[in-house]
Structure formats: structure tokens, C-alpha cells
Image (cartoon, grey):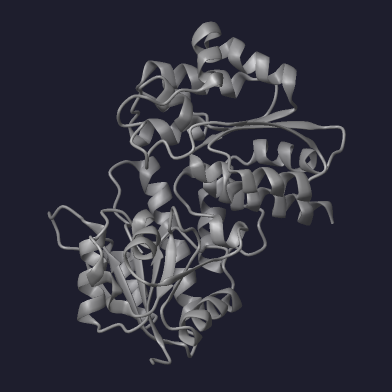
Amino acid sequence: MSDTATLFLFVKGAATSPIENLVAQAQVAAALDTLEKMRTLPEIAEIVIATADADCAARAAALGARVEMDPPGADFHWGNRIAALVEKYRAAIPLYVGGGSGALMEVEDWRTLIRRVLDEPGTIVTNNLYSCDFAAWSPGDALTRIEPPALDNDLAFRLSEHTQLKVVALPKNAATQLDIDTPTDLLMIVFHRAVGKTLRAFLDMARLDTARVVQILPLVRNRDATLLIAGRVSASMSLFLERETRCQWRIFSEERGMRASGREARGEARSLLGFHLDQVGASRFFATLASLADAAIIDSRVLFAHRRLQPTAPDRFHADLLEPEQIGDPFVREFAAAARAASIPVLLGGHSLVSGGMYALVDAAARVAH
């Protein structure tokens, strides 16, 4: 049995537009913070960073990491890439971390995860069985017994289904569930105490407009306030909100698993809120929400899927920041403009907004309250 693990840190880094670069460089900053934490752990024998970003590679190398540059011009297949690196480095116990994930994990959180796998061979420890962002497993060659997934999200589930590995899912909280996928995810962590120094410096430099978050934070602790959350909201999130907040909640949970099931790709996603939006238009839609709640937190991707839209990443991200002037798609532009003009604060984002982002928001609200 090996007594150390090998860290494989994947960082995209490259982006094709300024708004996508904002998220990509935040992921780089988060990854460098993770590297700084991991290099202090004796349980980590070697750190390997896989990236297409030359600056990220140079900074990681200066911290002692082995660098594996993504092959230029090749179609990237995540499963083939991780399998090749695990084999190359003969990793008996690999720890995979996606660049935007684990940004709020502390050193001891990582140590606990690694120790669990070191002490229990035949185990995979992951942040999410059905949508994996990071995971450690033993033995490393278990990867050879599954079809390599195109995306990291399927890693833990495939290992659990097709090998004999015992699955340990980490407790759901801001540290385990927060993944930097969209600009809104950055807004949700601006006030969180566990943000690392490199990511903190990046956030300070980015100077994001946090006004809507600032308005929502005290509402979370206000017994007389009502907040609305809509989209792919899990049952565990509903229980968390009931247990950890003081406000009242209106929860519209719709289309969980729409991507994994293929409903989104087949144009079969349907949303009750989406039907209302179809009937009354964006301005009246947000007027209705304002009559029901003091703030709205919306996984807008469900509404886009309901309308069979596939907005570009720049359009989605500018909508998240309520910047309609930068949006090409007419409906997305109208929707973002109406959200910005709403009489209540509105947060738009993807699935991470109503999962890891909410854990981070509630953590920050408790800290501000004290």
C-alpha cells in the first residue's frame, strides 16, 4: 500500500473572449492557491499540473510542480488525458482536482481527504458522486477498468459503477461544492473567509460589482424576508436553507439532471417558470418575482433550455453580470436587461449558483452578521 498520493491539477487557462478570460484566470488563481496548500502536505509525493496556459505553467513550476502542457491543436478528451498522466507517473493513489474546484478547501480538508484514501485502499473519495469536481482513489489503475469519460463530472460515478471501489462522498458545504464556472461564482465568494491569497488578489483586481450580493446578505438572516431560488435546486440544498437561514424561501426545483439525461440536448427541458416567462415576457416575469420575494436567485440555464436556446459562453456570462449591452442573443439580452431593472436584487448563473454558490453565500451571511 502506498503512503503518498500524486496530485493531478487540471487548469484550462485559455479563453477566447475577455469575459471567458475573467473566469479562466480566476480558475488559474484558485488552482495556484490549491497548489500552495498541497505542497505543504507530506501525504502528497508529487504535484502535476496539466494546462494550456503558459503563465500558469511557469508559476506552478516555480512552486515545484511538474508541468504537462496540453497538446496544441488537439481535441481535448479529459478521460484520455487523466488516464495517460496517471500511467505516466505510475500514480498508485491519484488525486484529481479541476482548476476551479476546491477553492475554499483548507489544508486540513485536503489532508483529511487524502488520509481517507491512504488508510482505506479500494476507496474513492469525491466531492460529488454524480458531478465530480475532485476525487482521490485507490488503486490508481482502476481507471483502466472504465471507459474514459469525456468530462470529469462522470469520473466518480463510472468508477463506482464499473469497479469495486467503495464510494465516500464528502459532506456538502461551500468548500466541497463551490466550483468556479461562471462570473457569478466569483460574486458568491468575494466575502468568504476561506478565499486563498492568489484568488483574493485576483478578485480585488477584477473589481466586480458586488452590490446585489451585498443587498442579499442581510436578507438571509432576516426572519421577515422572503427569498426565491429557482433552477436545479437539490433536496439537500432545500434542507440546508431551512436549517441554516432565518428568512423564508420560495423554492422552484426544476430540471435536475437535464444534461446527464440528455433532455437538454434533445430539446425536452421544461420549466414552470419558463412557461410563465413565455406568457408575460421578461419585464413582467421579474415584476411577478418581485411580488413574491425580496430577492431572486435563478439558475438561468434551465430557462434557456426551456426555450431551446444555446447561448454562447460570452452571452451567458454577460447575462450573469447583468450586462445586456454586451449580449448578442435578443432574448438573453432582454432577459438580462429586465433582471437588471427589477425592483429586487437578482442573481443569475448556472447550476453552481444554486449549489456551491448558495453554501458560500450563507457562510458569508453568517460571517457578516457577526
Question: Which residue does the image show at 31% across and 78% down from the upper left?
Answer: 140
Q: Quadrant of the N terminus?
A: bottom left
Question: Which residue does the image show at 57% across and 68% down from the upper left?
Answer: 105
Q: Quadrant of residue 305?
A: top left
Location of residue 77 with respect to 253 vertically, above or below:
below
On the question of residue 207 being in view, the answer is: no
Q: Is residue 286 left or right of residue 70?
A: right
User: Residue lying farthest right?
Assistant: 224
Location of residue 50 with respect to 280 vertically, above or below:
below
Pinpoint residue 50: horizontal percent, then vertical percent.
Answer: 28, 68
Q: Quadrant of the C terminus?
A: bottom right
- Which residue is more in the foreground, 270 or 25? 270
Q: Is residue 122 left or right of residue 193?
A: left
Pinpoint residue 110: horizontal percent, then vertical percent.
Answer: 53, 75
- Which residue is more in the foreground, 214 or 49? 49
User: Residue lying farthest top?
Assistant: 279
On the question of residue 245 being in view, the answer is: yes
Pinpoint residue 213: horizontal percent, then vertical percent.
Answer: 67, 40
